[in-house]
Amino acid sequence: MSFVVAEDVRKRAKMYYGDEICQVKSREMLKEMGLPNGLLCLKDIQECGYDKESGFVWLKQKKSYTHKFEKIGRLVSYAPEVSCHIEKGKITKLVGVKSKYLMIWIGISDIYVDDPPTGNITFQIPSGQFKKHPISAFDIEEDAKESKQVKEV
């Protein structure tokens, strides 16, 4: 899977290069949108971008990565390229993220936080089926000093 970000989107977007700054910026964006900051656990991110006007987000990492969310015992696979549209409390049109359920990898299409808040986050697949998990399972404790040391390029 390889996608090309449209030139007009790239011109409007804030883009970052390198794992360190992309990790910080992706977590900040998730937090700003009312989502848990550990939702997109990618590794070795080479490029990330966010077009605030359309809500389009993309992240490119060196290779696919599988992460286990220990608090819920669930494996999630992130493709080398992940994209989505983001708005307050929601991720839609998610591409490049799958979760393992009963020995089958299933693509996740939408993620949203319950409104009014219930402490749960919902993961939906293209067929409309969904699964809820506690938001706390996807929060990452951040060291305040660490995030301040990263400089923007």
Image (cartoon, rainbow, N blue to C red):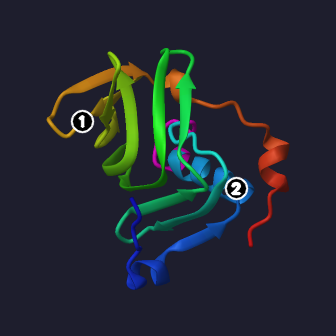
74 sits left or right of 55 in the view: right
The structure residue drawn at horizontal position 54% and vertical position 59%, both measured from the top left corner, is: 60
When the figure is inspected, residue 5 is found, relative to residue 93, above or below; the finding is below
Q: Quadrant of the C terminus?
A: bottom right
Reading the image, the residue beneath label 1 is 125
Between 28 and 58, which is closer to the camera in this rendering?
58
Residue 114 at least partly seen: no
Q: Is residue 149 left or right of residue 23?
A: right
Q: Residue at x 41, y 78 (%)?
A: 9
Q: Amino acid at mark 2?
A: Asp
- Which segment did they paint magenta? 31-38
In the image shown, does 62 or 55 lie closer to the viewer? Answer: 62
Would residue 10 be counted in the magenta stretch?
no
| Residue 151: % across, % down | 80, 64
* Residue behind mark 2: 19
Task: Kindly state the secondary structure of the residue where label 2 is placed.
Answer: helix
The spot of residue 138 in percent (x, y) is 53, 28
